Image (cartoon, rainbow, N blue to C red):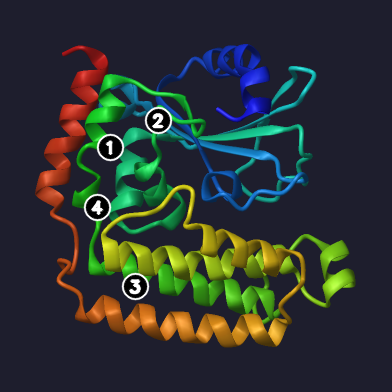
Amino acid sequence: MSSQTQTQAPSLRAAVESTDLNVLMLVEFGSRAYGAATVESDHDLLGIYVEHDRQLYGLEVAETQSYRLHADGELVRMGVSNKPRSHADDIEFLLHPLRKYVSLAAAGNPSVLSTLWVDTSSDLGVMTSPAAELLLAHRDAFVSKHAGFRHAGYARAQRDALLGLTNKRTNRPELKNLHGFDSKYASHLIRLLMAGLDLVREHAYHLPMKPEQTELLLEIRRGELTLADVLTLSEKLENELMTETQDSSLPDSVDFGFLNDLLRQVRNEHLGR
């Protein structure tokens, strides 16, 4: 854990336990995981919890749950969207039910998929378990051409939002006033494409990213590249990602039969069955 997260570790662990969820793994993701955090960056954690039998076989639905832990120890349950902006001393954590987590990773969701490459013994790991390590040991099973194409698709959506072509709005007017565009959002766009290329070329994410990649992301965040520069770079990277994904030796999609078996094994391992 990072120094601040370590400082808040007892309250964080207590906060997670207070949710009454059977948590399997909790790790840093986002800018801190990628190595592109600034002093203003908050802590974003993503985790997995194992569903109760009543949620698997009964009528109760296992839902993704989102929380914000304030520095004073107050834990607030948040909505998944339309959250107020967080502060640098906040810790936010999102907990997916195991089945949803595996489904999102199999579908190539970049935020979820990337957490399979977190070193849980490093500062990025907050909570882990033997079942989590079993899941991480089979991360290669989640890499496919579909995941590469999904990175490009997410990047296109971010570019459209950056340009105001969709209803989604960025939430940093101070950056737009300073640089003429939301430079943090622009860095996310480039990060998505670079991470997608790493996934296709090396069948892996790098957390943190390579030094030259993180330096580029920080330059974008500081406004050292113009919006035109970012758009030109994003078009170049997207073209490379689309071409290299299509030409790669990766399978078109994941082996869902294998992942079904893995899901059962991970659940049983965590529940001691």
Q: Secondary structure at mark 4?
A: helix
Q: Compute the Cα span from label 3 to label 1.
A: 22 Å
Q: Which residue is mark 2?
A: 120
Q: Which residue is mark 4?
A: 142
Q: Which residue is mark 3?
A: 149
Q: Compute the Cα span from label 2 to label 1.
A: 9 Å
Residue type of the residue flagged with mark 3: Phe
Residue type of the residue flagged with mark 1: Leu
Q: How many residues crowd around disc 2 within 10 Å: few (fewer than 14), some, or many (20 or more)?
A: many
Q: Which residue is mark 1?
A: 136
- Front residue of 70/207: it is 207
Q: Position of residue 81 (x, y in %)?
A: 64, 49
Q: Compute the Cα span from label 2 to label 3.
A: 27 Å
Residue type of the residue flagged with mark 2: Thr
Q: Compute the Cα span from label 1 to label 4.
A: 10 Å
Callout 3 touching callout 4 (CB < 8 Å): no
* Residue 207 vertical position relative to residue 3 in the rendered view, above or below: below
Q: Nearer the N terminus, badge 4 or badge 2?
A: 2
- Front residue of 84/92: it is 92
Q: Position of residue 193 (x, y in %)?
A: 46, 70
Label disc, if present, on residue 170 of the rendered structure: none
The label nearer to you, 2 versus 1, is 2
* Residue 52 vertical position relative to residue 122 in the rendered view, above or below: above
Callout 4 touching callout 2 (CB < 8 Å): no
Q: Residue 7 sits in which quadrant?
A: top right
